[in-house]
Amino acid sequence: MNRTKNPGFKFNEWELKGVPVRLELGPNDIAKEKIVAARRDMRDEKGRLVKAELSWKSLEEEVQRLLEDIHHNLYAKAKKALDDNTVKVTKWDDFLAALSDGKLVLAPHCNTIEWEKKIAELSGIHFASIPDKTGAGQVGKAKALCIPLEQPELPEGTKCVISGELAKCWILFGRSY
């Protein structure tokens, strides 16, 4: 296949596909017995991908180490974003406010399907009553995403965020559109 596209287009094409590392090899690199690796997970102050020189002799090990570092870096960024955007609430009004702010909500729940459906119904009614830019009601409703494996402590007597019954676990909710 003849590819007559310029290098910038090719670099961008592979970056959009999600390739984590781009290896560059030119005449100067061959003379130095080095290969330049561009990391997709980090950018410099001008917004360009961070690059590192890798040795030919240990290329396999260095690329493996680089991929592991990229994995840990991407995981840490994702974990921080999740933690920064998750709110723990125990009251219905706080639940709706956090969802309105685009947050994920960790709330105590009685863990029954009936009350999970009620949360979706009541939150949908709530959002529909709030006008959007056009004056129509907003769309969306709360949806249970998961019951986290690592449960925060549930103090004795904690009530479900919606039913008022004793909570059995914490459930993570998000707003579906």
Image: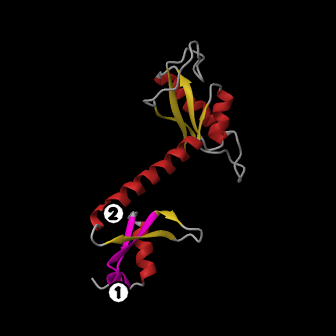
Name the quarter where the N terminus is drawn.
bottom left
- Image quadrant of residue 38? bottom left
Question: For the point 65% across and 45% down, which residue is it?
Answer: 138
User: What amino acid is labelled 2 in the image?
Assistant: Glu
Observer-nearest of 61 and 10: 61
* Residue behind mark 2: 62
In the rendered structure, does residue 176 fall within the stretch colored magenta?
no
Question: For the point 57% across and 17% down, which residue is it?
Answer: 155
User: What amino acid is labelled 1 in the image?
Assistant: Pro
| Residue 81 image point, x, y percent | 55, 47
| Residue 75 image point, x, y percent | 45, 49
* Residue behind mark 1: 27
SS at circle 1: helix
- Residue 136, placed above or below residue 88: below
Magenta highlight range: 21-40
Left or right of 92 in this view: 151: left
- Residue 50, placed above or below residue 127: below
| Residue 173 image point, x, y percent | 53, 35
